[in-house]
Image: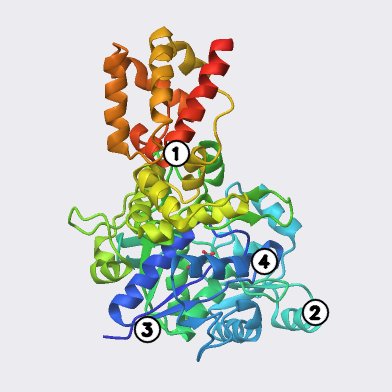
Amino acid sequence: MTKVRVRFAPSPTGALHIGGIRTALYNFLLARKTGGTMILRIEDTDQTRFVPGAEKYILESLAWVGIKIDEGVGPGGPHAPYRQSERKDIYSRYASQLVADGKAYYAFDTEADLEEMRKRTPNAQYDAATRMSMKNALTLSKEEVSSRIAGGAPHVVRLLVSPGQEVLVNDLIRGEVNVSTSQLDDKVLMKSDGMPTYHLANVVDDHLMEISHVIRGEEWLPSAPHHVLLYKAFGWESSMPRFAHLPLLLKPDGNGKLSKRDADRMGFPIFPLNWTDPKTNETSTGFRETGYLPEAMINFLVMLGWNPGTPQEIFSQAELIEAFSLERVGKAGAKFDILKAQWYNQHYLRAKPIAELSEYLLSALKNQNISCSADRAIQIVTALKDRVTYPQDFWEQGKLFFVAPDKFDDAAVSRKWNAEAVKFLKAFRDEVGKEPGLNAERAKGLMEEVAVSQAVKPGQVLAALRIALTGGMAGPDLMQTIEILGGEETARRIAFALQSLSAS
Ligand code: GLU
């Protein structure tokens, strides 16, 4: 078996879409599973779409989710350079070779010429049907072509596609895809700015870098027949990589491809990290900054298209490497179910040691200049652990232990605050204030005793107690809340609520 060498080949045209991380992940898992090599190549030959900062963003995103690059931009390696803009000479050499072999040709058509062609024949493309009416090396004399090239006339190099043949793309996920060359245009390989197109650079590099598997998004499937033709034109067919085109990521409801606009509208991130578009200054919040943990991200993403064939849903990176195979990647588009991403995040957050979780709270408290002992932080985090989705929730939901409510939820008050509750709260305030160090169990006992003495049912008054302590109806277990606040603070908050709410 040839050694597995896979590459992630993003273009630095903006923030990396989260789908790019999935593509990188599948490549990485195959490399790790087979003892192969994971390569990062930056495809930056389209100067018009180059965005400063995008390459750094890609590297940082991969590092964040724990995808380690063995070779390429970053670590370097035997096929350096790995940035296509630094490999220009290589591509022009290979393009010249194709021209010399009669597999590609120079074309001199201007934008206006191409426009004219499309006007003449609607839906026309540059191919066997049209090329003979255009300005290229097939229609102009040899002398004319040489003098134009020598005189520096703008020109491109096009692949000569012979019509009426079948091209077979053998895809590991989609099976055999057959396309007739009559449908394929004479793709531009070298542009007039001397830069290669994606197609040429991609194929030349995959060959030179000895890539064994091309694993990429389904949007590249239409390019694959041209790539196969290029391998043939170069005479590299026998070492052509295997193709695997990954299914699309769909909107959560499954209706159509997931776009940034959809994500924005539904209020979830689409980029791994925060990003500020250098052109528009538009900022986007990343998954990392939203509070997603890398292990949750990996787990969520791997399931978008792959399944283990068992009900197992939680996988460590080591388990994924063990379980992953391209055979278990499906063709069907994968719904981007953000609730599942949150579920994974909750899982991985809860699985962390309590001391680590309490650090989230302690650092938020530090930012707010609020002091708190390590023990108390642990106590709070323990009470909140099963209620949080993101690390910052420990502060969001835990601040009630540090900041007493100064106003109360009107809707809750109008439903739950009544004479019975007031009677109970007055008595409970007096009792609980005498027991500064009570625990949850004792708080419950005390609450029951007071309920009996005041002849009320706990169910009638507990909501009002919660309103008094937290300002609203949400929060962790009420008795635990009392334990954490302590008897005196509990009494103080009840007194304040009684005063504020009876005055209104
Ligand atoms: N540069 C292409 C991209 O941005 C790479 C596609 C491929 O992997 O061949 O996704």
Q: Which residue is mark 4?
A: 53
The residue under the point 17% across, 56% down is: 310
Q: Which mark is residue 150?
A: none
- Dot 4 lies on which element? loop
Q: Position of residue 339 (x, y in %)?
A: 38, 42
Horizontal side, residue 133 vs residue 27: left or right: right
- Spatial CA distance of label 4 from label 2 is 34 Å
Residue 286, position as x, y percentages in the image: 55, 53
Q: Is residue 333 visible?
A: no
Mark 1 → mark 2, Cα distance in angstroms: 81 Å
| 61 horizontally vs 430: left or right | right
The residue to which callout 3 is attached is 239
Name the secondary structure under disc 1.
helix
Q: CA distance from mark 3 to mark 4?
A: 35 Å
Dot 3 or dot 2: first in sequence order is 2
Mark 4 crowd level (few <14, some 14–19, many ≥20, 10 Å Cα): some
Disc on the earlier residue, 4 or 2: 4
Residues tagged 1 and 2 counted as in contact (Cβ below 8 A): no
- In front of the other: label 1 or label 2? 1
Whether label 3 touches label 4, CB < 8 Å: no
Quarter the N terminus occupies: bottom left
Q: Which residue is mark 1?
A: 485
Q: Is residue 102 above or below residue 226?
A: below
